[in-house]
Image (cartoon, rainbow, N blue to C red):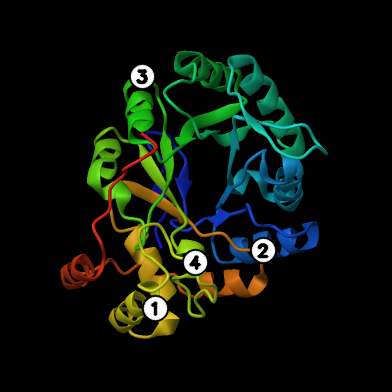
Amino acid sequence: MEPRQLGRTTLRVFPVGLGCMSFPDERTAGQLVQLALDAGVNFFDTADLYGQGTNELWLGTALKDRRSKVVIATKVGNRFEPGKPGWSWGPSKDYILHAAEDSLHRLQTDYIDLYQLHGGTLDDPIDEIIEAFELLREKGYIRAYGISSIRPNVIREYQRKSKIATLMTQYGLLDRRPEEEILDLVHDASISVIARGPLARGWLTAQGRTDETGFLDYNADELPGLRVQLTELAGGADKLTQLALRYSLHHPAVAVAIPGSSSIAQLTETLNSLSDAPLSEDELAQLQVILKKQRYEQNR
């Protein structure tokens, strides 16, 4: 699979990265990172909130000996006190500047490749937030910055006001909301999409989920039948993950998809499903029939 460029930056990433939120422990984190590296993965996404910084520490330890060969992305904006439950949203300029230094320390590096706002609303001090990111870039603490959001109006505001390189947003077969008003918008602005959740919490894997919950506007009764249709189109249950990843990557706005993994078995299945074959017009046409049209109704 050929590397893809992140926005207007010089950063180039393997099209499938590793979402690091679900690391269960330090040993497994190291094993997952090594397995991903062996497959050519060079994009690793975490956040200061995950494990109240522990996740960043584990990732930094796993990558410190090959720092120049990888792209590390982390996020900021959710305030927490180590050892105390819960967190609050508070992305002030001062907080972002101090939080970046904390992340650098935990990641055991002197620069972050991609620093992302971990959420956001129109009520935030957006100009102040942009100033913080720009200052961090001027200091060399970060190479580029972006936002993680599912709010179209917030995305438009940062697209209009800032130099964000990336937008992380949920996108895949079971969440097509970005297609309605986001993907073309950011692509035209040379902003790259990082597609999180491409496997829909495990619904789009060979084993599938065993619980009775639905996913967005697909209820629990609809999903088994949809899975049968998608499995048939994919050519078997063992190809369902591959179809899901190919779909998340098919729009030119998307630079990288980041399925998460908490076990060696999960990541092995994902890596064994990698394919550089683009979706055909026939596959896309069939998917248009099978899948629901979706749009953002809330979280504007």
Q: Residue furthest right?
A: 83
Q: Is residue 167 left or right of residue 103?
A: left
Mark 3 crowdedness (10 Å alpha carbons): few <14, some 14-19, many ≥20:
few
Q: Residue at x 41, y 39 (%)?
A: 167
Can you identify the residue that label 4 sits on?
213
Q: CA distance from mark 1 to mark 2?
A: 30 Å
Q: Which sits earlier in the primary sequence, circle 3 or circle 4?
A: 3
Report the quarter where the C terminus lies: top left
Closer mark to the observer between disc 3 and disc 2: 3
**13 in relation to 98, above or below:** below
Q: Which sits earlier in the primary sequence, circle 3 or circle 1?
A: 3
Seen from the viewer's position, the closer of residues 222 and 200 is 222
Q: Secondary structure at mark 2?
A: helix
Q: CA distance from mark 3 to mark 4?
A: 39 Å
Can you identify the residue that label 3 sits on?
161
Identify residue type, mark 3.
Lys
Q: CA distance from mark 1 to mark 4?
A: 11 Å
Can you identify the residue that label 2 sits on?
32
Seen from the viewer's position, the closer of residues 197 and 2 is 197
